Amino acid sequence: MELLLGIGRFVLATTLLLLLTVPTAFVIIQMEMKIIAQMQLRFGPNRIGPRGIFQSTIHGFKVLAKEDATPDQADRPTFTMAPWMVYMAAAMSMLVIPFAPGFVAVDSSISVVYFFAVLGLSVVGLLVAGWASYNKYSLLGGLRSAAQMVSYEIPLTLSVVGVVILTGSLSFVQIIGWQEQHGWAFLWQLPTLAFPVFYIAGLAEINRTPFDMVEADSEIVAGFATEYSGMRFGFFFFAEYVALFIMSAIMTTLFFGGWLAPWPFPAQLDGFWGIVYGLFWFFLKSYFFVFVAVWLRATLPRARVDQLMNMAWKVLLPLALVNLFVTAAIVLIFNLQPVGGA
Amino acid sequence: MTKTDPETRIPDPIELDRAEEERLAAAFGTAPGGGSRPAGGAEYAGFEQVGVPDRPPQTEREAEVYALEEGEMLFNMGPQHPSTHGVMRLVVKVRGEVVTDLDPVLGYLHRGIEKLCENATYTTVLTYVDPMDYMSSMHNEHAPAIAFEKLYGIRPPKRAEYIRALVMELNRVFSHALMIGFLALDMGGLTPILYSFINRDETVELLAAISGQRMLFNFLRVGGVNWDVNDEFINRLSAWRSNVGRSVSDNEALLTENPIFKRRTRGMGVISGERAIALGVSGPNLRASGVPFDVRKAHPYSIYDELEFDVVTQQAGDVYARYLQRIAEIKQSLHLIDQIVQKMPHGPVQAQVPGIIRPRPGRAFGAVESPRGFYSTYAISDGGPTPYRFRMRDPSFITLQVMPVLMPGHLIADTMAVMASLDPIMGGVDK
């Protein structure tokens, strides 16, 4: 009975989260179109629905109607699998995100490890997509993605280890619990630059501007996605925006107190209204970071491949290592206790 | 499924193509299917060879470009590629992401305009040259107008010269502004191009008010200009003048001190002054390498000897210097526009010329400083109503030969940045 309940809960949670990815992607695509339009002094989409709010929905349904072409020389099994791998990597890493008190699909004691392991799988999909397409643009895009994401995984994960040392837990829920008692981890980590390192590495990990050379349209057309069309391309496109949301959500959870309100009274409520209250703050904070990513996209040109690598290995990695030492020192100096005792 | 008689079956067009391919392959003695497909079903064999033409090389250069060493791959950019300017094709030989050789392939936009002009009367030639370098149509008209006036032996009235100089400088402003936008766009910056287009739109509206067209203006005539300017135009011009700096300074704020932009452009695609002269580079690209050559100063035409302006130069000769050069030249052009409006005399705008001009036999040369450099016309008259020979020297065409010299050793990503900084317009290159 216990097992059946567990399986039922798992199926329900995964289904709900998979369903959540689609509107998330729609909302972020719509945000991107409208916000960048405002920054570029133009109107943006304004024809479908009031003020154009259904534009991205229509785009989503449009890709369903498009022809799904496979190149003659493509390696069919991997070519077909690749979008699925990228999308599932993004969607499955949502399983451990705590949205509100008690509103998390899986509250595991190793959810931080799980999250970065699963999110890192998407690089396999991108590499496979680039290789299977039988196209030189795709090949270069795939190789760029492999080099970029593997390099940035290291500073990304190391900058999180600081928070783990600070809170003494690998569970997102307990990390939020620690922040309820001690204040945002961001404030504790201010002197160690953990958050800037995480933010930059996070942008590179999900291939956002200024690190979008995986699909640099002026150089390699569309990178790994050049030969993809129809819903297969749609999966790549959705996965990219879902990953943006996930990265913002994790920033919120690790550094900015997750579902907690920014002031201590009441940081969270109980019962049904607690979930609503938590969801409100969680999505507000997450979408703020989504907005910053969109803002960067409208502002910055793209960095170059070798500069990107230099940045990862020569700047971010040393900073992330220093972060570990300084965080450990902070824990010692302030005699911080891990959540729930040692 | 019924079995169809092979005699009566309508042939599939793809099969017809294959038959034609096999016929050609037999004629040329190469493998059927051409070089675009690996032979014998081996999945990835010869992948790096895709793009090598399946015929023997026809020039030494072609043999050099298409001969691949171990670890090299051909990478084709264009003619339909998101960032090549117009329909340009670059065959790039790469080792990993590093460019080892590069060959521009031209001719996708060739319209035979020079030959068309040899069959048109002198008056109508000025309408044909507009779409050559379509970002500076006014300058396209100016060079032949000067040459034809020399051939026919007339001078346009003073006011016409001033109006010509005014529209030239307006054209230069939006052309340089667009170059800045495209440079940023080719490096992944999405916003500057839109600010540039605001600038272009406002400027083009002005030019449309005076000429009636937004892109191919058809404004100059042999011996003058088509329309006079009136007070309303001057008012609109001063309104434009007061806010034209905004889009330029917006772009400057986004790019000039941007660390990512600076890192990608400084020391990139460096060409020294001597090398630039040897390769025939002219215009802003030459001045960005420190050579103070400007046709307006060196060989003054129109009224440029009466106006005061500086020949701005940069020393570095890299992509960043070429970007700064464009911004400096926009400011010089605005300075010129102010002087022209102040000094503009009254009078006619068109000299007396017959409907069909028949100059005496002879030859004439007219050169202007276009936004891309030394733009000139050479025309020979045999006494008839049409030019016997008509030739345009387009600076973009000459500038493109710098690319194979500059690019080896750089990355694929820099190809687009260097290309955009040279600002070639394919309409002018292919004519």
Image: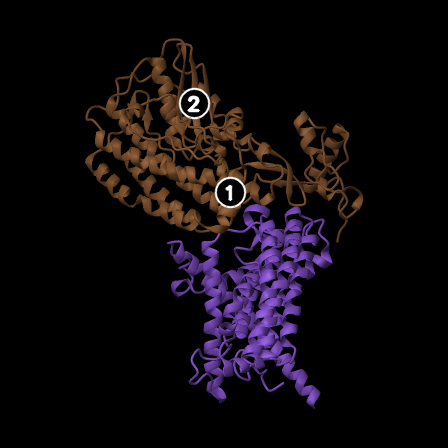
Chain colours: A purple, B brown
- How dense is the environment of label 2, judged by Cα within 10 Å: few (below 14), some, or many (20 and up)? many
* B215 relative to A12, above or below: above
Which residue is most to the front? A333
Which quarter of the rendering shows the C terminus of chain A?
bottom right
Evaluate if marks 2 and 1 touch, with contact meaning CB atoms under 8 Å apart.
no
Q: Position of residue B299 (x, y in %)?
A: 37, 21
Q: Nearer the viewer, residue B86 or B401?
A: B401
Q: Residues under labels 2 and 1: Cα distance?
A: 32 Å
Q: Nearer the viewer, residue A200 or B369?
A: A200
Q: Position of residue B202 (x, y in %)?
A: 32, 43
Which residue is painted at 58% across and 36% down in the image?
A: B89
Q: Earlier in the sequence, mark 2 or mark 1?
A: 1
- How dense is the environment of label 1, judged by Cα within 10 Å: few (below 14), some, or many (20 and up)? some
Tell me the residue that label 2 is attached to: B376
Which label is found at residue B324?
A: none
> Which quadrant of the structure image shows residue A6?
bottom right
Q: Amino acid at mark 1?
A: Arg
Q: Are marks 2 and 1 on the same chain?
A: yes
Q: Quick one: SS at disc 2?
A: strand
Image side of residue A293 versus residue A8, left or right:
left
* B263 relative to B288, above or below: below
Which quarter of the rendering shows the N terminus of chain A?
bottom right
Q: Count how many numbered circles sit on residues in the image.
A: 2
Q: Nearer the viewer, residue A17 or B3?
A: A17
Image side of residue A210 versus residue A89, left or right:
left
Q: Nearer the viewer, residue A147 or A71?
A: A147
Image side of residue A143 versus residue A45, left or right:
right
- Front label number (2 vs 1): 1
Which label is found at residue B266?
A: 1
Chain letter for the residue marked with disc 1 in the picture: B
Q: Amino acid at mark 2?
A: Ser
